[in-house]
Amino acid sequence: MLRHPAPVRAVAFSPDGVRLATGCDDKAARLWNTASGQQMLHLKHEGWQAWVNSVAVSPDGTRLASGCDDRVARIWDMTSGTPLLSVRHSGWLTRVYAVAWNADGTRFATASDDKSARIWDARTGAELVKVQHSALISSVAFSPDGALFATGSYDKTARVWDAATGDLAQEVRHDGLVSSVAFALGGSRLATGSYDGIARVWDVATRGQLLEVRHSRPIASVAFSPFGARLATASSDRSARVWDSSTGEPLWEGQHDDLVAAVAFSGDGTRLATGSYDKTARIWDVSSL
């Protein structure tokens, strides 16, 4: 159990599973040793409204991206904690709700309540692609090959876009706000989580629904295991759950003392990280599933 001074909104493993990044409402991202629980880095975000909503580790494990309520997304060196780059969304009170890397680490995406998601050059900070929803965009994810990226929005839709051009490829819909999106290995399936308490798995090519699983309260986060066999969900019902992503069979459940905001698998799929408003991040052994 990794204790924080405020709610934990985001978790992300390094590719080798040795480190866990967390994002917290105290305006800091932290890097932890997953074996010892020792804090390795404390990355303070300046600004009067810099709660950290999202963290993502680059594919080579050298850089951390963070998205904050101060409309800024930042990239940090994961060894020294040195800030390397920052990009900004427009609007005085704009929040960056999500960040994600493409497969080779040359680009990263951000999602914001300015109703836009953007793809940036990770070296220069140049804006490469911009797409829009009709409401706040809560989540963003690249397909494993980087050709597509997905967005989830409070307009109750998830959309799949061409990552090079920004052209719309597909759209699927929930009855509630869409809080989270995640691609499975291969990029043929997309998971979506919603405030309607439902997580769905979709066929990206056909928009056909392949699976539906439910919580009793809103779902805040979804994640596939590395090979796509398992689907994890996090909910405001204070639970995180793991499901068989083909059958929907429930395989595991972990409990927090407050709503669970984030969930992430380690690179080998043996561990699951969760972040909660109970001010903790936890790492669970799910190797037997």
Image (cartoon, rainbow, N blue to C red):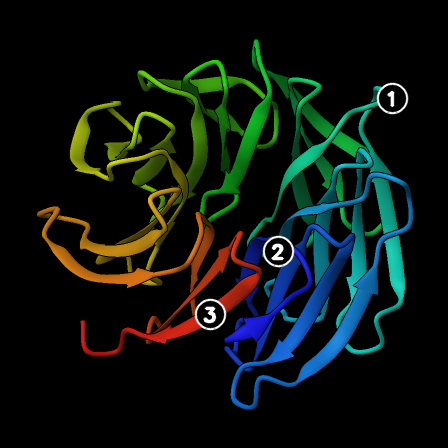
Circle 3 sits in a helix, a strand or a loop, which is it?
strand
The image position of residue 255, as x and y in percent, is 33, 61
Q: Dot 1: within a 10 Å radius of its alpha carbon, few (fewer than 14), some, or many (20 or more) residues?
A: few
Residue at figure coordinates x 71%, y 61% from the top left = 64
Q: Which of 47 and 137 is in front in this view?
A: 47
Circle 2 sits in a helix, a strand or a loop, which is it?
strand
From the image, which quarter does the C terminus lie in? bottom left
- Distance in Å between CA atoms under marks 3 and 2: 17 Å
Disc number for residue 282: 3
Residue at figure coordinates x 57%, y 9% from the top left = 134
Which of the two discs, 1 and 2, sits closer to the camera? 1
The residue most toward the front is 257
Identified by mark 2, the residue type is Ala
- Distance in Å between CA atoms under marks 1 and 2: 24 Å
Identified by mark 3, the residue type is Arg
Instruction: Describe residue 133's horizontal placement relative to residue 213 as left or right.
Output: right
The image position of residue 197, as x and y in percent, is 29, 32
Q: Name the residue under label 2.
A: 56
Image height check: is 271 above or below 220?
below
Disc number for residue 92: 1
Image height check: is 127 above or below 275?
above
Note whether residue 125 is visible. Answer: no
Q: Which of marks 3 and 2 is nearer the N terminus?
A: 2
- Residue 2 picture quarter: bottom right
